[in-house]
Amino acid sequence: MGSPINQTLLEQGLNFLGRETARQTHEITNVHNIINELSGLLGDMLAAAAAGRPLEPERVGKIVTKIQEQIQRGNNLVRGLNRFAHSVDVLAGMFDLEEVAERVEFLAERHARLGKVRLRCLPPPKNVSFDGFLLGYQQLILDALDLILESDGRSNEVCIGYQVADGVMEFIVESDQPRVKNDRTVKGIKQIEALIAELGGRLSVPGEAGVLQRVVLSFPHLQAGGG
Amino acid sequence: MDALRVLVVDDESELVEALVERLEIRGFQAQGATSGAEAISAAQDHQFDVAVVDLKMPGMDGLQVIRQLMKIQPELKCLLLTGHGAAENPEQGRRCGASDCMMKPIDIDVLTRTLAELAGRG
């Protein structure tokens, strides 16, 4: 992006960092709550066994496996959250597109789950690095996803993809079904337009007026390399 | 005395299954639902004494679910579960018709006592 990050970008980035961190802590809390119930259930079974009821080893084994799965889920969440927190280590500079995509996929999982849609994240082109504000790009993609999820109608799947050609980088968020714009969509579009303008990019929502299916975030002036 | 009939609503299916089983071990007649729609359908088919409803769920949130459940069964007592205990949650819950609010993780002894109290058997 070539110029220092201004106050607006910093404020929005901080807001995004806090909002997404809070969302992920909800997921981690869910994991704790499930482990709490499963371990409690094991305790109940042991108490019943002490009272003379036969313990079912197969049943105990299944509960232990479920606990291990939740611990793995928790580890993945903590690892993803940690990587996301490191997004502010270097606020602006050269970033790898794959790095952006990985972080976006982690964050988008919860948005998609709450929006009751399947998430498909396409791998970005390899070895593409660009000069920019890492938090800002993550926020834009997540905001574009929310734009679709908060519009009226239903999607089975929402896909996040990346394209780089002739020095233009595009982030594309697309629903498999057309959705209908509502007041939240209109407000969301204005917010994305304001943020993307700060980052030197452009938002386009192709298609009929009132319909929302594909959101394209274009950055024509990025110093993209590799490919 | 008949067993208390409890509906447990949370989008985390593992939590619902475990909690239902733990309540049954303690003599409750418990049924689980992993979405607002499932909970509403259960309330249309069966009578419950208390519903334990998680606040944060995809689609319909816990407050909306409580409103709908109480339209179907006006006598139903609802206990709102919250993950983070934001200050406004208990008040929001009461405005939507919840009789009480409890923070997760659940202490099963506190929960069973609360369920009995809400159903007038405390």
Image (tube, coloured by chain):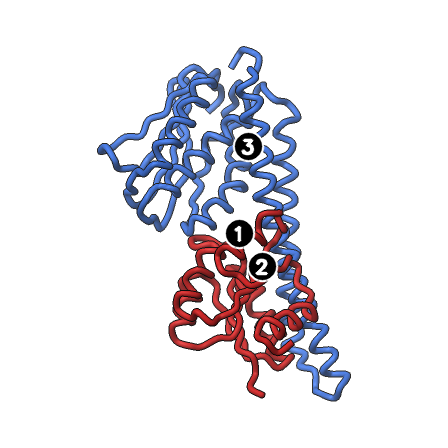
Chain colours: A blue, B red
Q: Which of these two is toward me, B15 or A227?
A: B15
Q: Secondary structure at mark 1?
A: helix
User: Which residue, as the protein is rendered here, is positioned at the far top?
Assistant: A3
Q: Is residue B122 above or below residue A37?
A: below
Q: Chain of mark 3?
A: A
Q: Which mark is residue B51?
A: none
Q: What residue lies at 42% left-to-right and 39% top-to-bottom?
A: A146
Residue that numbered label 1 is attached to? B92
Q: Position of residue A149 (x, y in %)?
A: 39, 43
Q: Position of residue B7 (x, y in %)?
A: 51, 71
Q: What residue lies at 54% left-to-right and 59% top-to-bottom?
A: B54
Q: Secondary structure at mark 3?
A: helix
Three-letter code for the amino acid on which mark 3 is drawn? Phe
Three-letter code for the amino acid on which mark 1 is drawn? Gln
Mark 2 near mark 1, Cβ–Cβ under 8 Å?
no
The quarter holding residue A59 reads bottom right
Residue that numbered label 3 is attached to? A16
**Can residue A73 be seen from the camera position used here?**
no
Q: Chain of mark 1?
A: B
Mark 2 near mark 3, Cβ–Cβ under 8 Å?
no
Cα–Cα gap, marks 2 and 3: 26 Å
* Residues tagged by mark 1 and mark 3 found on one chain of the structure: no
Q: Position of residue B68 (x, y in %)?
A: 41, 62
Q: What residue lies at 45% left-to-right and 34% top-to-bottom?
A: A143
The quarter holding residue B45 reads bottom left
Q: Secondary structure at mark 2?
A: strand
Q: Which of these two is toward me, A92 or A210?
A: A210
**Which is nearer the N-term, disc 2 or disc 1?**
2
**Can residue B92 be seen from the camera position used here?**
yes
Q: Chain of mark 2?
A: B
Q: Which mark is residue B81?
A: 2
